[in-house]
Image (cartoon, helix red, strand yellow):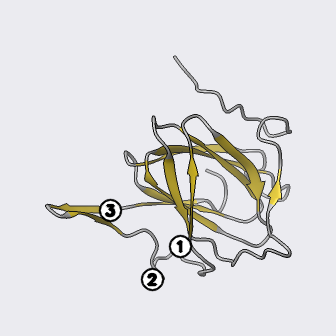
Amino acid sequence: MIQDVRVKPLKVIPDERGRLMEMLRSDDDLFKAFGQGYMTTACPSVVKAWHYHKKQWDHFVCVHGMMKVVLYDGREDSPTYGEVNEFFMGEHRPILLQIPPLVYHGFKGISEYEAIAVNFPTEVYNYDDPDEFRVDAHDNDIPYAWERKDG
């Protein structure tokens, strides 16, 4: 596992009315800070990658469908430098994924319908000076290919 990445299993509480699932609480041991909350989606087989932040920690939860979230540790001073982690998350594996600053990340919709993720970053998005640095999804130095691995 890439250093400083954490996974929190989420508990789903169903009843005859529906279900409830807590995602991130301020009393969680992995809680850092609250910047804002937003949702993002991926259509089936669509890749949205790569980017990283210099200050911001992300806290992803896929609440509808399934996503493959991939991380790459590009931090040269990290003991896990060069490591790649894949996380399959969503309806069939409810988890919160904590992503530290300077770790590249991206995701792919892997369900037959639009997948929806919620993120609770530690920083507010700054429209004038975004803490977001992008790399092309397929043409880069990251040792990862987004195609499905059959077999």
- Secondary element at tag 3: loop
To which quarter of the image does residue 99 belong?
A: bottom right
Lower sequence index among marks 3 and 1: 3
- Mark 2 — residue? 27
Q: How many marks?
A: 3
To which quarter of the image does residue 103 belong?
A: bottom right
Would you say the residues marked 2 and 1 are in contact, meaning their CB atoms lie under 8 Å apart? no
Give the distance between the C-alpha atoms of the residues marked 2 and 3, in whole angstroms: 16 Å
Left or right of 65? Residue 122 is: right
- Secondary element at tag 1: loop
Q: Residue at x 71, y 71 (%)?
A: 56
Q: Residue furthest top?
A: 151
Q: Position of residue 47 (x, y in %)?
A: 66, 40
Left or right of 82? Residue 148 is: left
- Mark 1 — residue? 30
Q: Residue at x 78, y 61 (%)?
A: 102
- Secondary element at tag 2: loop
- Mark 3 — residue? 11
Would you say the residues marked 2 and 3 are in contact, meaning their CB atoms lie under 8 Å apart? no
Compare residues 41 and 67 and report the one nearer the observer.
41
Compare residues 35 and 79 and report the one nearer the observer.
35
* Kind of residue sitting beneath label 2: Asp
Q: Position of residue 115 (x, y in %)?
A: 49, 47
Vertical placement of 81 versus 59: above or below? above
* Kind of residue sitting beneath label 1: Leu
Lower sequence index among marks 2 and 3: 3
Q: Foreground mark, 3 or 1?
A: 3
Would you say the residues marked 3 and 1 are in contact, meaning their CB atoms lie under 8 Å apart? no
Q: Residue at x 72, y 35 (%)?
A: 144
**Neighbours of disc 1 within 10 Å: few (<14), some (14-19), many (20+):** some
* Kind of residue sitting beneath label 3: Lys
